[in-house]
Image (tube, grey):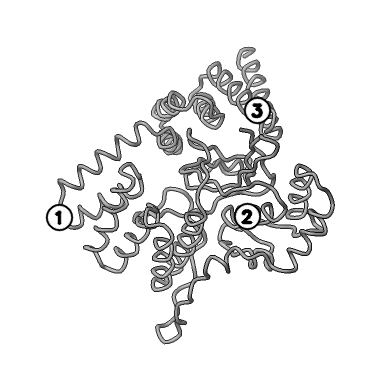
Amino acid sequence: MSAWTVPALLGLGLSTLLAVAPTRAAPPAPSPPLPAASVPAPEVPPDAEQILAIPDALRTLLQQRVIAATPSREQRLEKLVQLIFDADGMHLEYDPYATHTLTETWQTRRANCLSFTLLFVGLARAAGIDARVQEVAQVMTWYQVEGVIYSVGHVNAGVTLNGRTADVDLDRNVLYDRYGPRPISEQRALAHFYNNRGAQAMAAGDLAQARIYLRAALDQSSQFTPGWNNLGVLDVREGRLPQARRDFEMALQLQPRHAAALTNASALYTRLGEPRLAGQLAQRLQQVERKDPFAQFRKGNQAEERRDYASAISFYRKAIALYGSAHQFHFGLARVYFLAGDNRRASHEMQRARDLAGEDAGVLRAAYQAKLDSLKRWQKRTTAN
C-alpha cells in the first residue's frame, strides 16, 4: 500500500483524554466558564445526515471541476485534491480544533484530520472513486520545529484505483503503528466525530455539552473504547466516582491494553482506596509500555529533556528494537549520541534516519542529509584538533 500525503498540513484530531496532565505542551487555555445564569442550553448534536451532507454549492463545484472534467478516476482524484487545497478552490487550512460537519468545513475552509477525511471520502464517493475512512489506533507525530513528540489516534482516507490502494493523509510526518490504517464503519467514524466534540467541550468547561456528545459517540458504537475512557474522565471531574469506575472498566473490557484507560483507572482505584487493584493496572501498563515502541520513544524523549543521555539512548534503542523502520526513532538516537559525545554512532544513526525517510519524503530526507553533513564536518574539525 502506498501513502499519498498532502503537504503543509497536520493531521491530528482524535482525542483520548487522561485524567492527569499531558506530558506534551498543552493547547491554549480555554476561556473561563460563563456564570451559571449565562451558560446556554446544550446544543443538540448534528445527526449523521447533517454531518455528512455535501452542501449544494460544493456539489456543484465538484460536478464542474472534477466529475465533468474527466472520466478518468485517477485524474478525478488529482482534481479533487486541487479542488480542496488550491487557492481557487476551497483553499482548505488545518485547524486542530475544527471537528466540523462537511457544511461547516465548506463554510469555514478549516478542518482537522477527521473533518478532512470525512470531506474527502464524501466528495470522492460522489465522484465515483472508491474511498473509505481509515483509523490508526496510535501514531507518532513529529514536529520538526520544536521536536515535540506524542502519540494520539488518527484517521485518514483510503482509496482504491485500478486495483491499487493508497492512503490520503494530511500529515507527511505521521508514523503509523505497526498495524497501519484499517477501514472503519461509518458509525465508528461518527463516534470519533462526537468524541472529538465531547473532548473539546470538556476542555472548555462545558461538562453538560461534553456528556451529550460522549453519549452520542457511544450510541454510534458501544464498542468505542476512547468514548468510554473519556466518559470516565468526565465522571471523575463531576465527582461520579462509582460511574467513572464502571466507565473505565468497560473501556478495559473492550481493550485491556488501552494505555489511557489503564492510567486513568489505576489513578481512580488509588483514589477509591483500592491500592491492590491500582497496582495491578499499573503493572499491566508497564507491560504494555515495554512492548510499545512509541512509549519507549516517548520515555527516551523525556530522558533527553532531563539530559539523562544514557537513559535516553537505552529507551531509543528499545524503541528501534521494537520498530526498526521508523526514521524518527533513529534520528532521536542520533541526536542523543551526539549530545553524549559519541559522534561515530550519531553519524551512523543519522544515516539510517535519512535512508529510512524514503524517496517520497523529499523535504525530510534533505533535512536529514543536511544534519548528517553538518555532523560529518563537526567530526572532521574534532579529529583535526
Amino acid on which the number 2 mark rests in the picture: Phe
Question: In the figure, is residue 90 to the left or right of 258?
Answer: right
Amino acid on which the number 1 mark rests in the picture: Gly
Q: Secondary structure at mark 3?
A: loop
Q: Position of residue 351 (x, y in %)?
A: 61, 21
Residue that carries the numbered disc 1 in the rendered image:
273
Which label is found at residue 139? none
Q: Secondary structure at mark 2?
A: helix
The one nearer the camera, 355 or 48, is 48
Q: CA distance from mark 1 to mark 3?
A: 51 Å
Amino acid on which the number 3 mark rests in the picture: Gly
Which label is found at residue 116? 2
Q: CA distance from mark 3 to mark 2?
A: 25 Å
Q: CA distance from mark 1 to mark 2?
A: 44 Å
Question: In the figure, is residue 181 to the left or right of 279?
Answer: right
- For disc 1, the neighbor class at 10 Å (few under 14, some 14 to 19, many from 20) is few
The one nearer the camera, 344 or 268, is 268
Q: Position of residue 363 (x, y in %)?
A: 70, 35
The reply to whether the C-beta atoms of the residues labelled 3 and 2 are less than 8 Å apart is no
> If the image is split into quadrants, where does the C terminus sit?
top right
In primary-sequence order, the first of circles 1 and 2 is: 2
The quadrant where residue 202 appears: bottom left
Q: Is residue 364 above or below residue 77?
A: above
